[in-house]
Amino acid sequence: MSNFVESRGDWYCIVCNYQTNGRAWSHGLGISSDQRVVKSQRTVGQCSRCGHIQVLLTAAWRRETASLYDSYKAYALSEGKEQKVFSSDTTPPTLRSEKLVLRLLQEVGRGARWLDFGAGDGTLLSTIAHHDASAHLEAFDVSDHNKDEVEARCDLKKFHSNLAEIETGFDVIVLSHVLEHLQDPIEEALQLSHLLKTQGLIAIQVPNLEKNPFDMLVFDHVSHFTPRTLEIFASRLTSSFEINVDLYPKEIVALLTFAEQKLRAPHDVLPTSNHGRVLPVHEVVLRLDAAAASALTAKQSASTLGVFGTSTAAVWCAELFDGSFDFWVDEDESRIGKAFMGLPVVAPDSIPARSLVVVPFVETLASRLANRLISESSGSLLAIV
C-alpha cells in the first residue's frame, strides 16, 4: 500500500564501500525534498554489512534528480521563511537552524570562521549572523543562482561555487540537510576536512529514519541515515565525534572534530557502533504500509477531511487520497492562510467543526501534537496514522 515492491539490486555502499547484491525495494511514488510529488521509479537498498540504507544510483534516478534540482525551491510555501520546529506541548517553536547554531556557538565561540556547505538561500547563515554579528561567514553551493539572496540576508564574505578555490582555515563547516543528498559523502567530507583549522569542526544535520519513516519517501535523498549508520560514517573520517539524537525530535546531529587528517578506514574493517541495532528496510516499509492503511480507513468515515502538515508525510498522504480532501492544517504562521496544492492552509483554531484531521506523524510526536490540537480546535476529530 506504501507502493514499495521488493526486488533485487547490485550496488556498493557509499558509507562502508561494501559491494552488495541482494534485496532492494522499488517504488514509483516519491516526494521531493521541496515537497513535490515525483512519479518516477526509485530503488532503495540496504548494505548487508553496515546496514546503511541508500538509493541505487541508476542513470534514470540521476536524470530525474538533476531535473528536480534545476527548479528546486526550499520553503516555497512560506516564501523562503525557514520552517519551525515544534518540540513539545509547552515550549515555543524555534527556527530549524536555531538550535544547531546555538549548539555550535558553544563549541567555536564568537568571531569564528564559518562555511555553510550547501547554503541554499542563506537561511542558516542568517541565523548565525543574528546570534554573532562578528562571525566570518562564507557560503558554498554548486549553483550561484541564490548568490544575491544569500548576500542580502547576511554580511557574507565570499560565495563559492568551486570547492578547489576555497582558502583553508575554517573553524566550522556546516552540512545542514546536505549529507543525505551526496552521492559520495565520504570523499566530499574528506575534502572538506582539509579546509579546517586544526581542531576544526564539521557539523552534520540529517533526518533520522528511526524516528521518521516518511524520510524513505524523499525521492532525492541518496542516504537514509539512522544514528547507527551516521556513527559508522563519522568513524571512517575521525576518531573524535559526537552523535546527538536529542537536539531535534526527528533529526540527528553529528559533530566531527579533526585534530589531524585521518585516512579512510580499510574497507575490510567495519567500525563499531554504540547506537543500537540495524534498522531493516522491511520494518520501515511495514510502518509506511500501516500508515497508509490507517489514513485510507480514516478517510472513509469523514465528510470533511483535513491533513495536518505541509511537508513530506502530508504530501504523501494527500497523494494517497488522490487530492480528495478539503484543507491542510499547519501551526507555522508563515504558511497559514496560503493555498497549497490548490487547497487552503488553516490554523488549528480554524479547523471546521465536526471535521476529521489525518495526522501522518510518528506516534510520539503525534501524541504531543494531539494535545495541542485538541485544546485549540473546535469539535474536530484526529486520526493519527
Image (cartoon, rainbow, N blue to C red):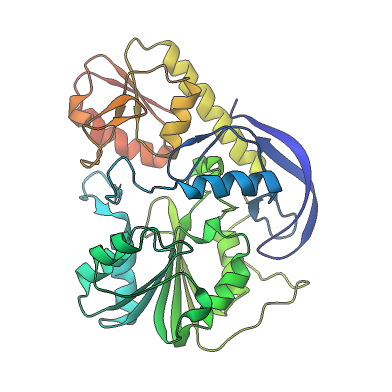
In the current view of this chain or complex, which residue is farthest to the right?
Answer: 21
User: Residue drawn 53% across and 83% down?
Assistant: 194
Residue 24 vertical placement versus 198 (above, below): above
Q: Nearer the viewer, residue 343 or 287?
A: 343
User: Residue drawn 23% across and 23% down?
Assistant: 351
Q: Is residue 365 left or right of residue 192?
A: left
Quadrant containing the C terminus is top left
Q: Quadrant of residue 341?
A: top left
In the image, residue 197 lies at what x, y percent? 44, 88
Q: Is residue 267 left or right of residue 36?
A: right
Residue 313 visible (yes or no): yes
User: Residue drawn 46% across and 84% down?
Assistant: 196
Q: Is residue 88 left or right of residue 277?
A: left
In the image, residue 218 lies at what x, y percent? 52, 43
Residue 220 visible (yes or no): no
Residue 382 vertical placement versus 100 (above, below): above
Q: Quadrant of residue 308?
A: top left
Total labels drawn: 0
Residue 109 vertical placement versus 17 (above, below): below
Residue 125 vertical placement versus 303 (above, below): below
Quadrant containing the N terminus is top right
In the image, residue 130 lies at what x, y percent? 20, 68
User: Residue drawn 53% across and 49% down?
Assistant: 209
In the image, residue 138 lies at what x, y percent? 36, 74
Q: Quadrant of residue 370?
A: top left
